[in-house]
Amino acid sequence: MPPFPTELTSVQRVTLAPSRPQTYRIRSSVLVSSLGDKFRYDVYVTEVPGTDEAKQTKGDFYNLARLPLDYSRVTQPHTLPSNIERGLRILMANETYDFYLFPSYTLEPVAQLVPWLSDFHLSLLLPVAAYWFVSLFFWYIERKNYWPQYRIHTPEELKQRNRVTVGEVLRSVLLQQAVQTALGLCLGYLTDAGDFQGRDDYDIAAWAGRVHRARGATPWMLAFLGIDGQTLASRIQTYATSMGSTVTTEKPLVLLNSIVYPHLGDGLTYGFAPWELWVAKTIYWVLEPAARFSIAIFFSDSWQYFWHRAMHSNKWMFRNIHAHHHKMYVPYAFGAFYNTLTEAFILDTIGTTLSLMLSGLTIRQTMFFSTISVMKGVDDHCGYRLPWDPLQWGNEQNTAFHDVHHQSWGIKSNYSQLYTTFWDHVCNTVCDKSDTEIEQLYEKSRVLAMQKAEVEKAM
């Protein structure tokens, strides 16, 4: 990106004054110089006579009187265009008003992760593949009887207590996945889903502008903390020589401005200081994606909890929609999505779609979120408390927590699914039994299943 400010060419010098309301088309940068505790603002513009042209180009102009935040303090009807070549900075009465031209950009489709398959189609297929991959892993260790010490239920319980066959579960899950994939295809084509690239610099500059405006609250924050700006500036005058040529020991307010308004120094890019761009990049590449995922997780958990709880509170909904899933008293991995199509549509299709729309995740972020969500759902039904399972680390919402909900003595508790148990704690629906009581109930079920199996074998 080119530096700021730039060399001025073919421009007319005009000094703005409150007594001279005009309409101007900005042609280049602004030179700012400090005069003690006040500032002179010299703007290089080309004057546009009258307002007719401004009205004709209404999409290219900003009205200072209508700008948000501190811009609203400007009362003169100067109309400034949005296509400023580098940026306009007006400092009057020690107040700062900034206008920037963000970098231009050209959008182009993101290169596909798989050459022969679009990212959109991959985002539909990857969660399905993850479902069966994780399910087959747990099926394999169950068949080989690996790590039996970590199993919640015994093989006898799996045979004796469930009210649905493995074949019925497989057919139901396959049908559900086929329907959901078809709905995803339709929704994707209707919304023309796809990721584009090319505007990273523009978005970073937009965040830098927000950071730049937010730093205007620094004097207020200092005052709130009981710190006087001028006193602070005086106390650090001994470091004035390291603050650049604009700082002198005779001007403590200018020193403070160098701290509070560091954009006044050299090394600016598009009118932003290096630290503002650094903060903007951190927000854009780290904090903003984290916020989007947090929104998706919170909404998804909220949607799942309240609908799930409603299906247990309403007898008709439980009998006709949700009881299907509770035929599995002993959950296992590939039975995680054993639901009626109605429940799958409400909880998964609608819930996931809304969470993605509200959070604004990209296709690739959607791919990651959906895949992890599916893997987490399978893991919550796997029946193994594996200490090295990363999907069960540091989170109360895990296999042991959800398995309690599948038991007759815990069916009215532990409604949370997938990521957190936030709403169970807020709504006081966490199972109130102690770990010792829960283990005694599990042991009772194991003994009864074993006895029943021995009776059947004797017959």
Image: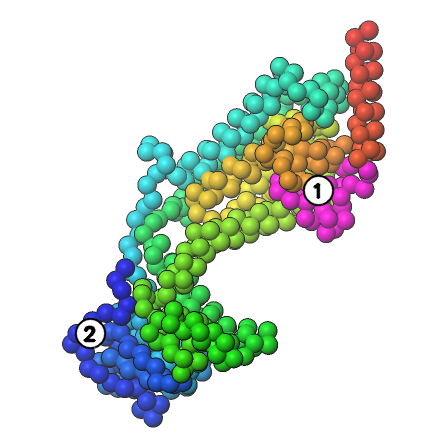
Q: Residue furthest top?
A: 458
For label 2, count other residues whose C-alpha is less than 10 Å away and answer few (under 14), some (14-19) or many (20+).
Answer: few
Residue 8, label in figure: 2
Note whether residue 440 is visible. yes
Image quarter of the C terminus: top right
What residue appears at the point 41 percent right and 82 percent down from the top-left corner?
Answer: 251
Q: Position of residue 213 (x, y in %)?
A: 44, 70
Q: Is residue 352 left or right of residue 58?
A: right
Nearest the eye: 424 or 42: 42
Query: Where is residue 329, by image quadrant?
Result: top right
Q: Which amino acid, mark 1?
A: Tyr
Query: Where is residue 402, by image quadrant?
Result: top right
Residue 415, label in figure: 1
- Characterize the magenta stretch by its predominant secondary structure: loop
Q: How is the image coloured?
A: rainbow
State the separation of the CA atoms marked 2 and 1.
66 Å
What residue appears at the point 55 percent right and 50 percent down from the top-left corner?
Answer: 294
Which span is picked out in magenta?
Answer: 410-434
Q: Secondary structure at mark 2?
A: loop
What residue appears at the point 71 percent right and 42 percent down from the top-left corner?
Answer: 415
Q: Is residue 260 left or right of residue 300?
A: left
Nearest the eye: 247 or 356: 247
Q: Residue furthest front?
A: 238
Q: Which amino acid, mark 2?
A: Leu
Q: Secondary structure at mark 1?
A: loop
Nearer the observer: mark 2 or 1; the answer is 2
Q: Is residue 102 magenta?
A: no
Q: Position of residue 433 (x, y in %)?
A: 82, 38
For label 1, count other residues whose C-alpha is less than 10 Å away and answer few (under 14), some (14-19) or many (20+).
Answer: many
Q: Residue furthest bottom?
A: 19
Q: Position of residue 37 (x, y in %)?
A: 40, 85
Note whether residue 174 is visible. no
